[in-house]
Amino acid sequence: MMDLANRDGAIKLRDHLIAYWLERGYEIEAEVIEMGFTPAMRSVRWDVRTNLVNGRPPASARIRRAAA
């Protein structure tokens, strides 16, 4: 199982989320942030922050396509 809390895992998760929503016509914002040392994990924790609301992109993230 992939560790999504380390830097590499967080970057992969960010890239996956962006690609997932892009395929569905949304351009979301996502960034990887270092949260510092976490004693419970005994390591540095990395978070992925997005503009998703309840797991869905906001309406403003919809890609406008030109009419053919």
Image (tube, rainbow, N blue to C red):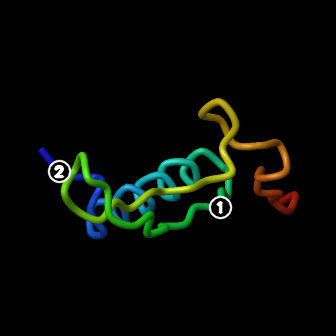
Q: Quadrant of residue 14?
A: bottom left
Q: Amino acid at mark 1?
A: Glu
Left or right? Give the position of 16 relative to 49: left
**Residue in view at x 26 percent, y 62 percent:** 6
- Of residue 52 and residue 32, the one placed in the foreground of this image is 32
Whether residues under marks 1 and 2 lie with C-beta atoms below 8 angstroms apart, the answer is no
Left or right? Give the position of 40 relative to 63: left
Counting from the top left corner in percent of width and height, residue 37 is at 32, 64
**Residue in view at x 24 percent, y 46 percent:** 40
Q: Is residue 30 above or below residue 20?
A: below
The residue indicated by pointer 2 is 2
Q: Is residue 7 above or below residue 51?
A: below
Counting from the top left corner in percent of width and height, residue 47 is at 44, 57
- Of residue 17 and residue 34, the one placed in the foreground of this image is 34
Q: Quadrant of residue 15?
A: bottom left
Residue occupying the far top of the picture:
54
**Residue in view at x 48 percent, y 67 percent:** 32
The residue indicated by pointer 1 is 29
Counting from the top left corner in percent of width and height, residue 51 is at 69, 51
Q: Quadrant of residue 12?
A: bottom left
